[in-house]
Amino acid sequence: MACQQGKTKDEMVVSLQTIKKTHVKPRKKLGRRECQLVTFDLPYLAFYYNQKLMFYKGGDFEGMVAKLKDGLEQVLEEFYQLAGKLGKDEEGVFRVEYDDDLDGVEVVEAAAEAVAMEDLAAEEGTGIFKDLIPCNGILNLEGLHRPLLAIQLTKLKDGLAIGCAFNHAVLDGNSTWHFMSSWAQACGGSPAVSASPFLDRTKSRNTRVKLDLSLPPDPSSLSSNGDHAKSAPPPPLLREKVFRFSESSINKLKSTINSSTPSDGSMPFSTFQALSVHIWRHVTKARDLKPEDVTVFTVFVDCRKRVDPPMPETYFGNLIQAIFTGTAAGLLMAHPPQFGAGIIQKAILAHDAKAIEERNKQWESEPKIFQFKDAGTNCVAVGSSPRFKVYEVDFGWGRPEGVRSGSNNRFDGMVYLYQGKSGGRSIDVEITLEAGVMEKLQLDQEFLEP
């Protein structure tokens, strides 16, 4: 193992050797193509690149890399936007620009041969991932001069790590895993992707919004009087941990919360709502909030079937919106779980085509670029989805040994839900919390074993 004596896996010092950097383009010439970014895309310009890490068993690193790059050339013929860059038209409207002369997708080959699979499979921490995934701390706005997709293929002691950084202004989670599964199909010998991406974003929204955005100054730069700029107070120490909920635990959560018929006429609670309120209540408990403190629940909802007219599942881009709801911590904890689940359900059901349209019009009249951490007070913010078949992404050497998010776009209360590694209806819950709160949560047996 690569752990030094007395070090946790999150504090590992990785000896990484960069072998070479190349760029991969679509196999066919496609000419010049442009696609306007729309209202669903633009708010994510101030987020960071979305990072995913997958690791696989295998000993033929060179052969695996060759297959991955060959498949990437093929799949980029349809997902060519990922081989482009951000740009602006003559009116200052952001767009994706593709041209055959652009560099394409950046692919770095590296080796960290002291790192084993078991190091990456640890349920806690993401510090080690920073060496294995590109674009740490890189804003999506930097896609004006950076690749929209950067990939690092790292040789491990007993396998291969695939670290991907996607520009979040260009695609959401649904589109990310559509691309990943299509890439795997290409590597598996499929002559064409099973579901072509729907690339015309203006079908979802055609309002042209001009944004005057520039990159923030480097905080390490000198101030105008020659002194070093005042440093901001250090952020709170955060910890990340994966909590694995088995199929039986998920079934128990859902059946328990639906055991009593709601008196207000609400629908039965979904698996998502049952698990979400379980997380929300126990994180709130671990935070030891005052009864009058407000706690916010935020979820990034897929709007493909909610907009009018509905968009296809293969819509490529961002078609998500953040939904915010909340209550006093005392009310959330004093009532049974059905109370919090009802709040979540009501907010999700209310976010219909009319609500989406109103949100878009309001934003277009007064665009506000939020930072990734603006999810609310004492929040629990849920992203990703267990519906994404992440453990079915097989490039030709079996299912991944693990799937994780990188260190970007993390803040106190951020939650990623993934298809459970153990299969069935199991769900893996990746949570970021302040260190003291995480310590309490992982000792909460009612949370761990519902």
Image (tube, rainbow, N blue to C red):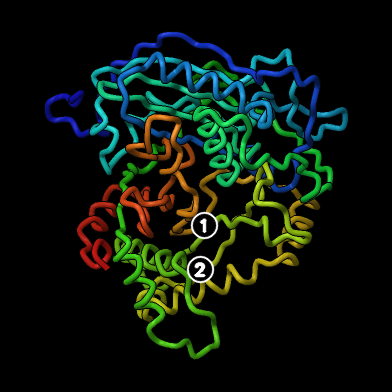
Q: Position of residue 21 (x, y in %)?
A: 50, 11
Q: Is residue 280 left or right of residue 73?
A: left
How many angstroms separate mark 1 from mark 2 (CA)?
9 Å
Q: Is residue 19 above or below residue 10?
A: above
Residue in view at x 40 percent, y 74 percent: 332
> Which of pointers 1 and 2 lies earlier in the amino acid sequence?
2
Q: Nearer the viewer, residue 396 or 358?
A: 396
- Crowding at mark 2 (Cα within 10 Å: few <14, some 14-19, many 20+): many
The residue that disc 1 covers is: 376
For this orientation, the residue located farthest to the bottom is: 263
Q: Is residue 125 left or right of residue 174?
A: left
Q: Position of residue 106 (x, y in %)?
A: 56, 18
| Rendered image: mark on residue 234 | none
Q: Are marks 1 and 2 in contact (CB under 8 Å)?
A: yes
The quadrant of the rendering that contains the N terminus is top left
Callout count? 2
Q: Position of residue 270 (x, y in %)?
A: 48, 70
Q: Is residue 303 left or right of residue 295?
A: right
As helix, strand or loop, the secondary structure at mark 1 comes to: loop
As helix, strand or loop, the secondary structure at mark 2 comes to: strand
Q: Is residue 379 left or right of residue 22?
A: left
Residue in view at x 34 percent, y 15 percent: 111
Residue in view at x 49 percent, y 79 percent: 268
- Crowding at mark 1 (Cα within 10 Å: few <14, some 14-19, many 20+): some
Query: Which amino acid type is shown beneath numbered disc 2?
Result: Gly
Which image quadrant for residue 201? top right
| Rendered image: mark on residue 326 | 2
Which image quadrant for residue 311? bottom right
Query: Which amino acid type is shown beneath numbered disc 1?
Result: Gly
